[in-house]
């Protein structure tokens, strides 16, 4: 027991670096494009910041009642596609995105949400700029919501 205490006291150096490394958690997610690794013949998982971007993209394209046992999980943006293309719809899209990120994605902090109306194509171009809190990096996700005739 005394040896253990001695070894704990003998730690020297800058401990800030070890704390920063210990806070970072590895994040993994399944890539929905299902790319196959050429050697292992297994699906290549997404890691760290790409996994977080993929999770955010999945939340944005998910509608209410799409997921079993998670009826309200999603931004429900497709429901707003058939509303008039005006300022109120853009505000509703931004609010839905802010709400779903605040509720289900605590790993990111939203920087800006840009909604562009592409009414000649019956679509919206949405760009979400955000900061990944753990990695302190800025990323963005772009989605085109298209209304089919």
Image (cartoon, rainbow, N blue to C red):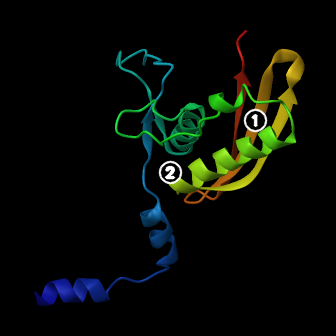
Q: Is residue 128 left or right of residue 73?
A: right
Q: Residue at coordinates 54% horizontally, 32% vertically from top-left?
A: 63
Q: Position of residue 69 (x, y in %)?
A: 34, 39
* Label of residue 126 in the image: 1
Please tell me which of labels 1 and 2 falls first in the chain. Answer: 2
Q: Residues within 10 Å of mark 2 (few under 14, many from 20)?
A: some
Question: Relative to the observer, which residue lies in front, 112 or 22?
Answer: 112
Question: Relative to the observer, which residue lies in front, 122 or 51?
Answer: 122
Q: Is residue 97 left or right of residue 39?
A: right
- Residue topped by disc 2: 104
Given the current orientation, which residue lies at the most extreme top position? Answer: 149
Residue 20 position (above or below residue 102): below
Q: Residue at coordinates 87% horizontally, 22% vertically from top-left?
A: 119
Q: Position of residue 53 (x, y in %)?
A: 58, 40
Q: Residues within 10 Å of mark 1 (few under 14, many from 20)?
A: many
Question: What secondary structure is marked by label 1?
Answer: strand
Residue 138 appearing in the image: no
């Amino acid at each position: 027991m005394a040896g253990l205490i001695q070894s704990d006291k003998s730690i020297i150096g800058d401990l800030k670096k070890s704390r920063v490394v210990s806070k970072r958690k590895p994040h993994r997610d399944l890539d929905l494009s299902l790319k196959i690794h050429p050697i292992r013949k297994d699906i290549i998982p997404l890691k760290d910041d790409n996994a977080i971007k993929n999770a955010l993209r999945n939340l944005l394209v998910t509608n209410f009642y799409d997921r079993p046992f998670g009826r309200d999980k999603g931004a429900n943006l497709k429901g707003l596609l058939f509303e008039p293309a005006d300022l109120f719809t853009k505000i509703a899209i931004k609010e839905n995105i802010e709400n779903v990120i605040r509720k289900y994605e605590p790993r990111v902090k939203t920087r800006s949400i840009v909604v562009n109306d592409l009414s000649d194509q019956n679509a919206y171009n949405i760009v979400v700029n955000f900061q990944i809190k753990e990695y302190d990096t800025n990323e963005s996700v772009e989605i085109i919501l298209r209304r089919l005739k």
